[in-house]
Amino acid sequence: MEDVPEEFQTDLASLDRLDDDSLWQIARSQKTQLEMERYESLLSKQQNTALTDTERLELDNLHKDSDRFMLRKSQAAAILKWRGHNVSRLAG
């Protein structure tokens, strides 16, 4: 956990109190197509032109949300594996 940004540590630490079904739900979760398209659109725009302050804030928030999302998925999978579940089907 020391490698995890402090802002995410409490959230990740709380995952070990969840039941297996809740962890599986997190581990299998996916971002919506709309979220992914907006994130990619802002990234692309940033490479080609300057973002407005509002767009920059939105991109920062989407980036932080994406990091949190992936950390939660990874932590949920790690806990499930530690609890003896086969998580190999999550890869890919």
Image: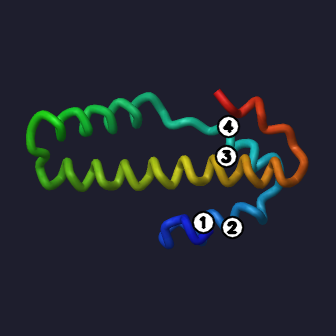
Q: Earlier in the sequence, mark 1 or mark 3?
A: 1
x then y, percent, for residue 70: 55, 47
Q: Is residue 51 left or right of residue 60?
A: left
**Residue on which disc 3 sits:** 26
| Sequence order check, earlier mark of 2 and 4 | 2
Quarter of the view holding residue 49: top left
State how far apart marks 2 and 4 are (Cα). Answer: 18 Å
Secondary structure type for disc 4:
helix
Residue neighbourhood size for the residue with mark 2, other residues' Cα within 10 Å, grouped as few (<14), some (14–19), many (≥20): few
Marks 4/3: CA–CA distance: 5 Å
Q: Which type of secondary structure does the marked residue at label 2 adopt? A: helix
Please, what is the three-letter code of the amino acid marked with disc 2?
Answer: Ser
Compared to 24, does 33 lie above or below? above
Query: Residue tagged by mark 1?
Result: 11
Residue 37 on image: x %, y %:
35, 30
Task: Tell whether 77 sits left or right of 81.
Answer: left
Return the residue nearer the eye: 51 or 34. Answer: 51
User: Which SS class for mark 3?
Assistant: helix
Mark 1 crowdedness (10 Å alpha carbons): few <14, some 14-19, many ≥20: few
Which label belongs to residue 14? 2
Residue drawn at x 57%, y 53% is 71
- Badge 4 crowding class, 10 Å Cα cut-off, few under 14, some 14 to 19, many 20 or more, is few
Q: CA distance from mark 1 to mark 4?
A: 18 Å
Question: Are the residues at dot 1 and dot 2 in contact (C-beta closer than 8 Å)?
Answer: yes
Q: Amino acid at mark 1?
A: Asp
Q: Which residue is mark 4?
A: 28
- Horizontal and vertical percent for residue 69? 53, 49
Left or right: 10 as drawn, with respect to 18: left
Task: In this rendered view, identify the residue nearer to me: 35 or 83.
Answer: 83
Q: Are marks 4 and 3 in contact (CB under 8 Å)?
A: yes
